Amino acid sequence: MAALQFHLRVAKLGTPTEPEQIHNLSPREIECIYWVSKGKSSWEIGTILGRSRNTIDFHLKNVMRKLDATSRTVAVVKALKLGI
């Protein structure tokens, strides 16, 4: 995890983040990525939020697409970096 975060920081060095391009995540997507950051599975998040596992997976796939992440872990690291 530390190596991944280091890589993301080095890769972004010198590229300023403008407020408009920070993110366009919905409140539900932010909530889902928050629970992923706490180590919860899709099933656990679904139970917490009262939604199906498939619905949670749908939201997390949208998060990954919007943050240009290849995995849930990378999405969490990028979300943390953006202050989400």
Image: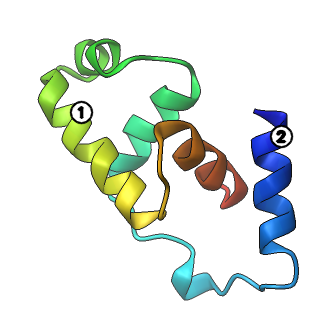
Residue underneath mark 2 = 3
59 lies above or below 65: above
Left or right of 61: which side holds 75? right
Spatial CA distance of label 1 from label 2 is 27 Å
Q: Quadrant of residue 3?
A: top right
Closer to viewer: mark 1 or mark 2: 2
What's the coloring here? rainbow
Q: Residue 72 carries which label?
A: none
Q: Quadrant of residue 25?
A: bottom left
Asked which secondary structure carries label 1, the reply is helix
Left or right of 32: which side holds 69? right
Q: Which residue is drawn at 56% across and 37% down?
A: 73
Asked which secondary structure carries label 2, the reply is helix
Q: What amino acid is found at the position of numbered circle 2 in the picture?
A: Ala
For the residue pair 83 and 16, the one nearer the viewer reads as 16
- Do the residues under discs 1 and 2 have CB atoms within 8 angstroms? no
Q: Position of residue 32 (x, y in %)?
A: 38, 36
Q: Residue at x 62, y 83 (%)?
A: 19
Q: What amino acid is found at the position of numbered circle 1 in the picture?
A: Ile
Q: Which residue is drawn at 53% across and 48% down?
A: 75
Can residue 84 be seen? no
For the residue pair 29 and 68, the one nearer the viewer reads as 68
Residue underneath mark 1 = 56
Q: Position of residue 47 (x, y in %)?
A: 24, 12
Q: The N terminus is located in which quarter?
A: top right
Can residue 24 be seen? yes
Left or right of 33: which side holds 44? left
Classify 10 Å Cα crowding around label 1: few (below 14), some (14-19), many (20 and above). Answer: many
Q: Where is residue 14 in the image (x, y as percent from the top left)?
A: 87, 84
